[in-house]
Image (cartoon, rainbow, N blue to C red):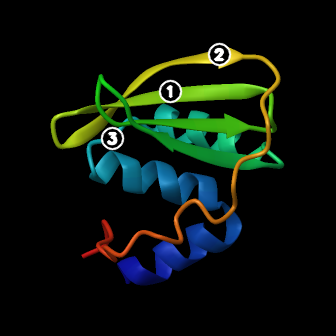
C-alpha cells in the first residue's frame, strides 16, 4: 500500500516526494531545493580540476558567470566560496583521462 502512495505522490508532486526522502535521510530539504535551483537554472556547467602547492582543488563555473570553489580536505572536497565574474568555457573532455570508475552508488 505504501508503494501506491509513493507512486501517486511522485506522479502529482515530485517535490513533495523529494522532501519526504530528504526527511527520511535526515537531510535538510532546503539544501536540495537550493542546489536544484542553482544547477537546474544553469545553461552551462564547467568543471576545472586543478592542483598546486596547496593540494587539489575544483572550480565549478555556471554560465561562465559564477565560480564555486572546492578544496581537498583529506579524503573529501570542502566548499570554499564563490566568485561572480566572467569565465572562459571549460574543456568538455576534462574527465576523459580518469580511469577509476568508482561511483557513489551502491
Q: Which residue is mark 3?
A: 27
Between discs 2 and 3, the one toward the N terminus: 3
Placement of 19 over or under 66, stated as above or below: below
Rounded to the nearest whole Å, what is the CA distance between mark 2 and mark 3?
Answer: 27 Å
Q: Looking at the image, tell me whether mark 3 or mark 1 is earlier in sequence order.
A: 3
Q: CA distance from mark 2 to mark 1?
A: 8 Å
- Tell me the quarter of the picture where residue 51 sits: top left
Which numbered dot is residue 10?
none
Category of crowding for the residue at label 1, using alpha-carbon neighbours closer than 10 angstroms: few (below 14), some (14–19), many (at least 20): some
Q: Secondary structure at mark 1?
A: strand
The nearer-to-camera label among 2 and 3 is: 2
Question: Which residue is at 79% across, 36% downward?
Answer: 88
Rendered view: 13 above or below 10: above
**What residue is rendered at 33% in x and 70% in y?**
103
* Residue 49 screen position, x and y as percent: 49, 44
The residue under label 2 is 83
Q: Residues within 10 Å of mark 2 (few under 14, many from 20)?
A: few
Labelled pair 2, 1 in contact (Cβ < 8 Å): yes
Give coordinates of residue 106: x percent, y percent.
Answer: 24, 76
| Number of residue marks | 3
Q: Nearer the viewer, residue 52 or 44?
A: 52
Which residue is disc 1 drawn over? 69
The quadrant in which residue 28 appears is top left
Query: In the displayed structure, does residue 101 sit left or right of residue 48?
Result: left
Marked residue nearer the N-terminal end (2 or 1):
1
Amino acid at each position: 500500500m505504501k508503494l501506491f502512495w509513493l507512486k501517486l505522490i511522485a506522479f502529482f508532486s515530485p517535490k513533495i516526494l523529494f522532501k519526504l526522502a530528504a526527511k527520511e535521510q535526515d537531510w535538510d530539504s532546503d539544501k536540495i531545493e537550493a542546489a536544484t535551483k542553482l544547477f537546474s537554472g544553469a545553461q552551462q556547467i564547467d568543471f576545472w580540476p586543478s592542483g598546486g602547492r596547496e593540494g587539489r582543488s575544483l572550480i565549478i563555473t555556471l554560465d561562465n558567470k559564477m565560480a564555486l570553489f572546492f578544496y581537498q580536505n583529506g579524503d573529501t572536497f570542502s566548499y570554499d566560496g564563490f566568485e561572480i565574474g566572467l569565465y572562459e568555457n571549460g574543456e568538455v573532455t576534462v574527465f576523459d583521462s580518469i580511469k577509476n570508475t568508482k561511483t557513489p552508488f551502491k
